Amino acid sequence: MTPSDAEAADRRLHPLSWLFVLLQQLRQFILPIIAAFFFGGDRNELWPLIGVGVLTLTAVLQYLTYRYTVGPDVLTIRSGWLHRQRREIPYARIHNVSVNQTMLHRMFGVAELRLDSAGGQKPEATMRVLRMDDALALERLIRHRGATVEAVEGEAPASHLLLAMSPGEIVRLGVISNRGMLVLLGGYAASTQFAPRLAENLFEQWGKAMFGWAESHHFGVQDYAIAGVTLVLALLALMRLLSLVLALLQYYGFTLNEDGPRLTVERGLLARSRNSAAKRRLQAWTLQEGVLHRLFKRRSLHVDTAGAQARDGQAPRALRELAPIATPAQCDALIEHLLPEAGWSSLQWERLHPRSGVRIFLGNAWFPALLVAAACWRFGWLGLLALAWPAWIAYAARHHARRAGYALNNRIVAVRSGWWSRQWRFAEIDKLQALRLSCGPLDRRWGMATLWLDTAGASQMSGPIRIAHIPEAQARALCDRLAKSLAARKLRW
């Protein structure tokens, strides 16, 4: 049998594939099964076990009826017993490849392979599960668009390391990020579902113990204030500790590699993930610098990838983070390397409208104004202390307007915003899909406008590129210039 005949033969998933499919199904039905077992009318009913048996039979049948064929240009997948399906997936249409391993996957030496296209609401294929070497071989085959396995292994370009995160950088990321707060909020939300009074009872018991002990020791107002500040500091320390643990679990061993025309990110301590995408699929770029980022002299670099939108309310698994945390020089070097003709370091930034600071303040001050009015009505002249909030908004808006701007050359369009937390958003002009010019009543009165730039991979978190509060004449001229450029260029995505 020739190598091509061997590649074209039908293949099965890993023999333990049914087990991982069963575990995936049990995650959806475990709560109803447990509820039926413990709260059913007859504790001796076998319905929960029958349900598990049906799910097991379904998983085994799915394994027995699932076949895939690795052709020279297309991946063919056959599945189904009564209702049979056949999917033909050309390698050229696969935009993002993800290889994921949980702890259980790593124990058995298997992985889950996920193939995404640009426009589908679901992945083109989720192969659960393959042997790890088979998953990596199929990933290489797709990456080189149908070359034989022998050719891929013999002629594949050497992988070039662009960025590797050391444990120290991961610790900095844990300190900077606020993922610990999300864990606490998620734990509270989960506790309200399974034990609605759990958090309330814990606070009540803590309050009784704390204030009873304080009363027996005759604490004063100052002592209560110190205890409150200590409690807040303890919660902040707990949040940072959780953020640090999550950063180590998610980003340990983070590497960004360039494999010819594709970028590959590999990361994870217990569960490993490997995400790959073609460089030409990178749509919009986001460079972020928060307050803690500046304290540690670090930035973060993210990208929107075509076909990487979130599905079914879940976060996208496709390539998104090029540099979760890095020095400004490393981020600039990545941009210059991946966009060599963009002229990122030599952009000429244009200022916003002279009244943009007032416009930003008015857009954000209506709620604080209502709060000040309510505080004055409730507390009298003491409510004027709430004016500190609008004063801070005015101060931040003034500095934001001074620093914000936009830049445009023959290759990219970029916008910078923020002062307390800074952000740069930019995209290649060839990746733009639509333009939108908007003017509100106040904008028209002051002669300013906002220009929205859409790309194929704009996610719900990042959204389109927004050049806000620039002079209306400049906005219209910029819109006309970009529209003519888009009409004359071929869309690359």
Image (tube, helix red, strand yellow):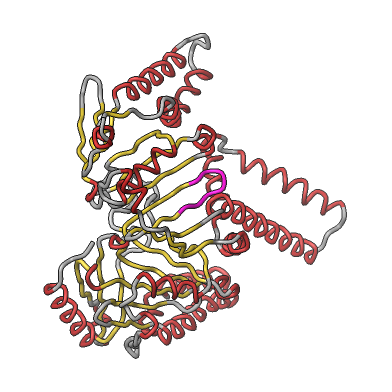
Taking the magenta stretch, the answer to whether it contains residue 365 is no
Q: Quadrant of residue 89?
A: top left
At a point 37% along the width and 79% down the height, the residue shown is: 344
Quarter the C terminus occupies: bottom left
Q: Quadrant of residue 346?
A: bottom left
Q: Position of residue 174 (x, y in %)?
A: 59, 59
Between residue 271 and residue 8, name the one nearer to us.
Answer: 8
Q: Position of residue 37 (x, y in %)?
A: 50, 18
Between residue 437 and residue 318, name the one nearer to us.
Answer: 318
Marks counted in the figure total 0
Q: Is residue 421 above or below residue 197?
A: below
At a point 37% along the width and 23% down the height, the residue shown is: 59
Q: Is residue 49 above or below residue 96?
A: above
Q: Magenta segment range? A: 266-272
Q: Is residue 390 above or below residue 261?
A: below
Q: Quadrant of residue 128?
A: top left
Q: Position of residue 326 (x, y in %)?
A: 52, 68
At a point 53% along the width and 12% down the height, the residue shown is: 43
Quarter the N terminus occupies: top left
Residue found farthest to the right? 217
Q: Is residue 22 above or below residue 180?
A: above
Q: Is residue 121 left or right of residue 296?
A: left
Q: Is residue 313 left or right of residue 374?
A: left
Residue found farthest to the front? 2
Residue found farthest to the bottom? 354
Q: Position of residue 263 (x, y in %)?
A: 38, 59
Between residue 237 and residue 173, name the one nearer to us.
Answer: 173
At a point 48% along the width and 10% down the height, the residue shown is: 45
